Amino acid sequence: MFQDLKESNSSTFQVSEFILMGFPGIHSWQHWLSLPLALLYLLALTANILIVITVRQEASLHQPMYQFLGILAVVDMGLATTIMPKILAILWFNAKAIHRSECFAQMYAIHCLVAMESGIFVCMAIDRYVAICQPLRYPSIITEAFVIKVTVFMALRNCLAPISVPVLAAQRNYCSRNQIEHCLCSNLGVTSLSCDDRKVNSINQIVLAWTVMGSDLGLTALSYALILQSVLKLSSVEAASKALNTCTSHLILILFFYTVVIVISITHSAGMRVPLIPVLLNVLHNVIPPALNPMVYALKNKELRQALYKVFNLDTKGRR
């Protein structure tokens, strides 16, 4: 009788909050990571705000390529802000508790914004494909209306598709454990605490990753394969070099973004004995691209760099 009562209580009891323990295995000195993470977050906010202001104010940048870059900057700021304030609160003030609803909201926001970043990369790849492979048709295809339509489509897709992740996670029965060995509310990290079967959550995560991120990666890879094929047919070395130079910064960011996503997926699936590695990669993947994206574009794109100098009244002598 008492055993039945105990089982009944454990099945009906639900934890009201989770405890984010931080970086597994280094709890005693993880606070030292707060300085580089805070600097990365500050850099991400500052650099992306500069990009948004420059693209908005400089008339020469009112082109689809730079409009997509401005949208990417907004998404990057949102992604970094979704996780970094809580991580810094954990490292600085030991504020590890997070309410269930807040945890599921963060889970949704991360999936939504990461998918949005992936979608913007696809839009930028298509933009470059049309500009290089169909230059005469570029003004009629990549119009302002096109930018608005694909942005709205990507926003709807990436807001609706990840809804299943927090909904399914919230349906699990969290009856005992509430300590998450992570700095953020990752889907697999949270559902691993459930007392019932979470197979449906894992399957949903895989299906979502392949349908959204997989299709984005496929379209991006196809666009750049066609661009490379077109460039190799150019008789002028100078023209080929100029065409490839416009894509270099984009390719650097895409390779970093998708490489880390694949590595995170493999390390989670393999169940590594050193859980610090996937957790650290997960955190860095959400803060390094937002800090890296505007810097790479500013360094590699002469037109954007000169616009930055002009908007903020910087001396451009010797920088051309």
Image (spheres, rainbow, N blue to C red):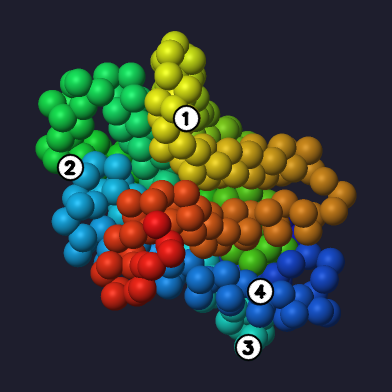
The residue furthest bottom is: 93
Q: Amino acid at mark 1?
A: Ser
Residue 6 lies, with reference to residue 271, above or below; the image says below
Residue 263 lies, with reference to residue 284, above or below; the image says above
Of the numbered discs in the image, which one, if any, rests on residue 148?
2
Q: Residue at x 50, y 38 (%)?
A: 248
| Earlier residue among tags 4 and 2 | 4
Q: Which residue is mark 3?
A: 93
> Marks 1 and 3, Cα distance to the nearest angstrom?
51 Å
Q: Is residue 70 left or right of residue 12?
A: left
Residue 262: horizontal and vertical position, in percent? 64, 37
Binning the other alpha carbons within 10 Å of mark 4 as few (below 14), some (14 to 19) or many (20 upward) gives: few
Element on which disc 2 rests = helix
| Earlier residue among tags 4 and 1 | 4
Q: Nearer the viewer, residue 199 or 134?
A: 134
> Marks 4 and 2, Cα distance to the nearest angstrom?
36 Å
Q: Amino acid at mark 3?
A: Phe
